[in-house]
Image: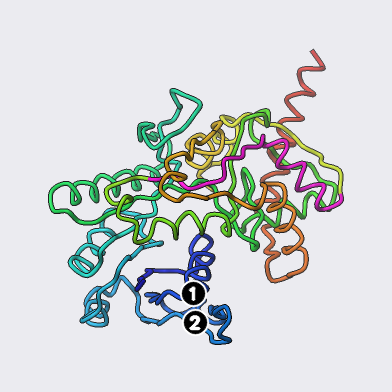
Amino acid sequence: MKILFIGGTGTISMAISRRLLEQGHELYLINRGNRNAGLAAQLPGTGEWNRPKEILVDINDEEKAAKLLEGLEFDAAADFIAFRKEHLERDYRLLRGKTKQFVYISSASAYQKPLADYLITESTPLANPYWQYSRDKIEGEDYLMKLYREEGFPVTIVRPSHTFDERSVPLGLHGAGGSWQVLKRMLEGKPVIIHGDGTSLWTMTHNSDFAPGFTGLLGNPHALGQAVQIMSPESMTWNQIYQVIADALGVKLNAVHISTEFLVAADGGRYDFNGSLLGDKANTVVFDISKLKRLVPGFAPEKSMEQGLRETVQNVLKHPELQREDPEFDAWCDRVIAARQMALDSLKQE
């Protein structure tokens, strides 16, 4: 197939790009080329290398992008960096009549909060009053489905949950610098914060397992006009997740549980925990992926959550460039934990 990706080198999309190249597809990437180096795959039995064709342009320069796309048509196209409706309006103008399928990467965070039923399917209502990111994704879905119904624009909507790769350990909360500061606290024996009581269930999917589900939808006529969630069927509590990380680091977990509402109040607008926690990670999620399995027979993640977490921890430890320190978040954690202890101490004195 001839496939176009806008982006194509991020956490979710890098594994997909590699898989398509390995399968011999003709892959075009629209991006600025910052992370394209080394993206190639050796074709089995041939010794030849399959590399993406680069269309180097800032996608927001619509006029230039349109010129570079002149004369090109695709079997499928996907935008991995579309976050708002105006991004999709631009994609529609650029790709109308040029692709047999357009895949929009939405988000499982768009599902209703709080949930009315513990088991999430594609029919679960979309409504998230806590997170603008999720509301923007919902607006994007509504826009594209309207185009599908009224004009036949060939859209497929994909809803990932928490997808990660080897470059960053997935966590419940962290600062702007990413997950390393929390791992550093663990290594130093300092307490780390787990939101709530840590018993809510969460689903994480390694990008190498997400990729087969995604690629199986490309060129699939039964996926047109459909929303499909792609993730591992496995869930773990946050307590289990943090324990796996501590074990992978070879340290004792020193966890401090703090209510999500308190963390949101203590956030002060720094980290948007109102959205990322109340609107997402503080909610128990269990996903039904039977629709994906019908559309992509044989879909079965190969990495357990524990295996993916352990491998990612080891990779981060081996690569200093991935160890981005965040002293501001570290100090914030210390203040929040100290405030909790002060409150406890005051109650003990009564």
Residue depicted at 44% across the width and 60% down the height: 215
Location of residue 17 in the rendering, given as x and y in whole percent from the top left corner: 48, 69
Q: Residues within 10 Å of mark 1 (few under 14, many from 20)?
A: many
Q: Is residue 199 left or right of residue 21?
A: right
Which quarter of the picture shows residue 317? bottom right
Q: Is residue 314 above or below residue 350?
A: below
Quadrant in which the N terminus is drawn: bottom left
Q: Quadrant of the C terminus?
A: top right
For residue 21, which numbered disc appears in the image? Answer: 1
Secondary structure state at the residue bearing disc 2: strand
Q: Is residue 231 magenta?
A: yes
Residue 155 is drawn in which quadrant? bottom left
Amino acid identity at mark 1: Leu
Which residue is labeled 2 in the image? 50
Which amino acid does the dot numbered 2 rest on?
Answer: Asn
Give the magenta-colored segment's residue range. 228-250
Query: Is there CB contact under 8 Å for labels 1 and 2?
Result: yes
Q: Is residue 30 magenta?
A: no
Q: Nearer the viewer, residue 110 or 150?
A: 150
Mark seen at residue 268: none
The residue lying at 76 percent from left, 17 percent from top is: 347
What residue sits 40% from the left and 48% below the top? 295
